[in-house]
Each structure stands twice: as structure tokens, then as C-alpha cells.
Image (cartoon, grey):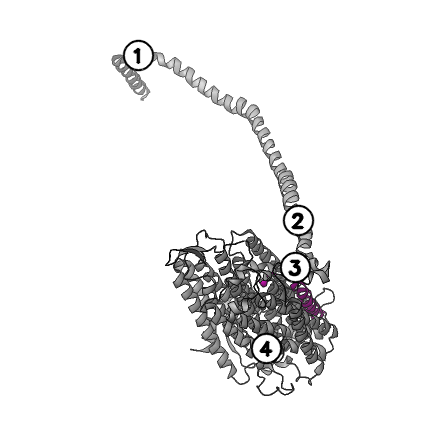
Amino acid sequence: MATETLIWLLPLFPLVSFALIILFTNRNKALSHTIAVGAAFLSFLGSMLVFWRALHVEHFAEHPFSSVINWLPLADGWLKIGVRIDPLSAVGIFFVAWTVLAIFLYSVGYQNYGQPQGDHDKKGLPPHGATVTDEHGHKHMVPSVEPMYSRFFAFISLFAFGMYTLMISDNLLTLFVGWEIMGLCSYLLIGFWFAKPSARAAAIKAFITTRVGDVFMLLGLAYVYAAAGSLRYEVIFAPEMLHALAEHASGFMGLSAAGLIGLLLFIGTVGKSAQWPLHVWLPDAMEGPTPVSAMIHAATMVSAGVYMIIRIFPLLEASHEAGDFTMTVIAFIGAFTALFAATIAVAQNDIKRVLAYSTISQLGYMVAAVGIGAYVAATFHLLTHAFFKALLFLGSGSVIHGMEHGVLHTGDHHVDPQDMFNMGGLKDKMPITFWTFLIGGFALSGFPLVTAGFWSKDEILGDAFTHGHWWVFGVLALAAFLTAFYTMRQITLTFLGKARTKEAEHAQETPWTMTVPLMTLAFFAVTFGWTGIPENFPLLGGIIPNWFHPWVISTLGEHAEAAAEAFNWGPLLTSLTVALGGLYVGWLVYRNVPAGAEDPLKKPLGKLYPVLQNKYYFDEFYDKVFVQPAMWVSAVFTFQIMDRGIIDGILHALARFSVFLGGFFRYVIDDPIINGFGDWVANTTRSIGNKLRVIQTGRVQQYMVAALIFVAAVLVYFVTAMP
């Protein structure tokens, strides 16, 4: 099959899966997940084949796989769309294919396929458990299957379609289509348990918050089209077009057209990738099922925002050369978000919420890397993060799944299976989950040399240090220390020590459909970093060829960076210190937390602890500044003043005036004139009738005599009238 045809098919498989499940197989759980996983596997195979072929094309960046079709007719031609796989999108579909397939397979076990229907389960609520009787006649609780099992697989199939569409697009328009499809799916999946008020509120919050960024992104797309006459990458990123956009003034704060376009598009990333100040939706997205969290936080939604600004990097670079502040804003937002979210994560107790703030922080790393011009480092960390963060989220879901088994065993549903202070000692109960989670956690922390996270994070720090972005380097280094600290806090509270609750004592390992994806992702959380070991790194450099950096940087063509800088020990020693130091301090603080104890950080942090625990009160601030005023505007100004007072007042006044006019026409025109004339005609007719009725005797003889007289008179008239 031609490569270009295969690329068109990559998003088609999950789209067909979505349609089949929704229309035909939604009552059959086994068939639904078979279709969904099968479609994900076909897209996976296609992606691997495209990736393999791309690796073997000489000068691939100059000769990418591309196919264009005419889509919409215009006055002077056609609006063209197409697919394009260059080095950047090739590595993009690589990580998307692996993580999506792992998440789909994991979902079969997570949604308890093969388990009985729950005793009290109903659509729109998480499964509650089912009572079964064993061979000895004893009754006990077991996990129950998700009531909306097929619906879930239909939605994640549509999600995968959106991400594949975004990745293979050769233009910003179909990228935006995939972007918005994922926005819809995130709303549907975060609020998957729609009968649960918190999930419903989280879905609305995510949808509205990301729409803020998307509106600005849409303005950016409109400006691109107005200025360049196209949304296709090869047109926008052509050197002459970039020069024209950089030279053309936008009229906004001294920015060039390239700078303003880059800023508007970046605001879309702020919403989609949950950067400050639009970060508030992502932690609440934990209300959805855990596989959804993995797709949102690793393989698809939030990665899409970073991918987009990496994709438009030539435009950002052109704006920087024009003297714009766009990249400075990007660097500031990214670095601030990285540290800001990391401080919040140290005081969260929900195992998934810690990872949510970790995701926000790591995305800040990537955004900051783009802001300082570290194109390859941002791409490298985007890929490694996708693998180890998907691993961590799926691992947290495995932990929760095991804890829920313990909750069903004890029957105490008041114990939160997601609170890390209710866990402990799970290392021996769930060994596969423990070791894979440990690998993912160490990769997140940047454990040196072994994990992928070390190589990608160290490269960002190295670029910031080498190119003199000292404040970015310092902020990211501090964020890296906090990352290692809260990661070890999470590992220690969850897996090490003794069980702090009965539920933790009865936790058990999850089925193979959940553990196999964990082991697969753990493999990439270690090995994928080896593809980007710098050639000049002491001892290890050059042992494994560094194909990633030159291959990805070739995407930029004439805008490619210069050769790698000389090795510098400063960033490496800093990276080693913050990673190992943070891990050690995290273990030291949390190694002996007994059952029922408070967080050891609570006392030393004092009044700062509740501030961190309550996320700097951003939700409360937004509620006061935006939500409540909006509710007042809708309830008081719009409803009472505008609707009831003005609009209804005008309508009621018109109604009263209409009643007045009706009375006027009735008594002045209708009754005396129209009705008077009608009554006169009727009365006259009646009077004539009364006078004529006397000649009606009913005797035929009289009628015959009258008729003869009439005929005779007529004859006489005609006879006398004749000449």
C-alpha cells in the first residue's frame, strides 16, 4: 500500500470503530471492545509502518510523505487540505500509536470486563460492586463491570481519531478540527459518570476553560489566513512568507504579524495544555475514568498544545528575530507554570491529583523549552513524558483498582481508594504495578542515566544554561527538585512501609490486560531516552547513535539549529543534585508515616500548607471574579432587568396597547359602522321578506293563474311592441 494512502487511513480506523459501536454493537461488550482495540491496533500497525519507512528515506525532511486534496471551492481556486509526515510528525505518531494502544488494552481490565453486573449500578455512576456466592455458599463482594462499557470505548475511539487527525495534518485548519474533536471528547469522558455532580461540574469546567484558549487560537488562524492566504505548513513556513510576516506590523503592542499570530496560537496552547492561568481544569479532569486521565495527560489532549507550538516554531523564531516579545512570554509562562504546579503537587493526597499537577509542571518544562528556542529538547521531553506519564496514570489506576478490591472486601465504602494516606505496603500486594510505577516515577524525577526523563529534562536545563537563560534554568531546576520530592512522596506513601488501612491489606494485583500495558510503557520510559544521548556526553556518548536530534531538527530545514554546544558539567551536576536530592528528601520525610497520621509537611510549612493544599485558592478566586459575576449577570441583569424588566416590559406595554386598539376599533368602528351596516342590511331583508310572505298561500291553482297572467302580459307586450 502506498505510504500516503496508509497515512490517510490512520485516523479512519478509530473513527469507524466509533461509528460501529455507537450504531450497531453498543449492546455487546465483547464485540465493542474487540472493535475498539482492533482499530487501535490497526492504526498502531499503520503508524509503525509509516515510521519505519520514514526512517529509511534519505533527507526525509526535504522529501516528506505528503498528499493534498481539494476540499472547499473558493472564488479563485480551492481550499486544499492534506496529510504530511515529516520527522516531527513521524515521532509524534510513534508515541501516539504506542500509548493509545496501551490505553485501549488497559481499559478492558480497568472497566472490569467479565465481571457481573453490579447490585446497585446504574448508568452515569461508577460501578459499585456485585455480590456473588462462592462454592461454599458464602457471599462476598467483587468488582462489577462498567454499566456504560461500550459507550466508553466509543468515546475513546473518537478521541484517538482526533489525535491522529491532528498529528498527520499538513495545515492548521484540520489540526484545529482534531483539536476541537479532542475538546469534545474530553468533555464527554471527564463527565463520563454524568450522574455524579463533581464529574459533571469538572466536564463543564474543562470545556469552558479550554474554550477560552480556543477562541484566541481561532483568531490566530483567521489572522494567518488573512496574512498568508493559506493555512498549510509549507506555505506559512516558507522563508519568504516568514520574512514577510516578520516585516509586517500587526499594530498590536508593537508586535509583528508573526509575533501576534504566535501569541494568539500560544494562548490556545495555554488552554489545551493547562498552563497558568488556564491550568485549573486539568486537576478536576481526574473525575473521569483513569484511562481517560492517561489519554488526556499523556497521549492526546494536553500533548496537542505543546505539539502545536513546536509545529509553529519557525513562526515563533521569525517573530523573535523581528524583536517581538512572544517567545519571552512563552518562556515565562512555561517556567512559572512548571514551578507553580510543582509546589501544589507536594501537598496533594489524591494519587491521581498529584500526577495531574505533575503533568501541568512537565508541560511547563516543554513550553519553557520552546520559549528559549530549544526545539529538539521540547520535542524530546514531549515524547519521553508521554510514555512515563501514561505509565504513571495507568499505574495509579491499577493501584486504585487494587484498593477498590480491598474496599469491597471490607465493605467500608467511606475509605477513599485514591487517598495515598489510606495505602502503604502495596509493594508486596501489587509487585508488577510497583516496579512499573517505580520506573515511571524515577523517569519523571529524572533519575540519572537509566531513565528517559533524565535525558530529556537534562537537555532542557542544558539548553537554558548554555544559552544564558539563567532565570529559566534556576526556576526549572527548583521545579525539578520538587518533582523528585513529590514523586518519592507518592511512591513511599503508596507502596513502601506497612499498610495503613484494612483495605490496603486486602489489595491485589490487577489482571494482565492492565499489567501488560504497564510493562510495555515501562520499557519505553527507560529505553526511549537512549535514542537522544548527546554524542559529547562523557563515557556514554556515541555508544548508542543519537539519531533523534539530527533527524527531528531537520524538520526545520533552513531554520535548523547550529551544531550541538560543547558539553558543560554545570547543568549535569545540577540535574543530578536536584533529582537524587529530591528523591532522598522525599523518602526521608515520608518513610515512617503511621496510620491516621497527618502529612509530615503540614507542621513545618505552617500556614503555607493549606495554601498549597487549596491550590493557591485559584478556584475560589475565579469563582469570585468570574463565576459569581457571570451568575449575577445571568440571574439579575439578564433575567430580571433585561428579560423581565425591559424586554417583558416592552412586550407587556405592546400587549396593553394592542388591547386598547382592539377596544377602540370595536366601539368606534366595528359596532357603529361595520356592525351597524350589517344589521341594517339584515333588517331590511327581513322587512322585505315579511311583506312578500303574504303572497305565499301554498295553493297551486293561484300560482298557475298568476303564471298565466304573467305570460299573457309578456305576450301582449311583445305583440304591441312589434312594428
The residue to which callout 3 is attached is: 598
Q: CA distance from mark 1 to mark 2?
A: 90 Å
The amino acid sitting under disc 2 is Gln
Q: Please say if 362 is above or below 532.
A: above
Upstream in sequence: badge 2 or badge 3: 3
Residue 697 is labelled as: 1
Which is nearer the eye, 195 or 95? Answer: 195
The image shows residue 519 at horizontal and vertical percentages of: 50, 73
The amino acid sitting under disc 4 is Thr
Look at discs 1 and 4 and give the one toward the viewer.
4
Residue 628 is labelled as: 2
Q: CA distance from mark 2 to mark 3?
A: 34 Å
Q: Where's the C terminus, which quadrant?
A: top left
For label 3, the SS is: loop
Magenta region includes residue 332? yes
Upstream in sequence: badge 4 or badge 3: 4
Upstream in sequence: badge 1 or badge 2: 2
Q: Could you tell me if the residues under marks 4 and 3 are in contact, i.e. CB atoms within 8 Å?
A: no
- Asked where in the image residue 190 lies, by quadrant, the reply is bottom right
The amino acid sitting under disc 1 is Thr
Q: Residues within 10 Å of mark 1 (few under 14, many from 20)?
A: few
For label 2, the SS is: helix
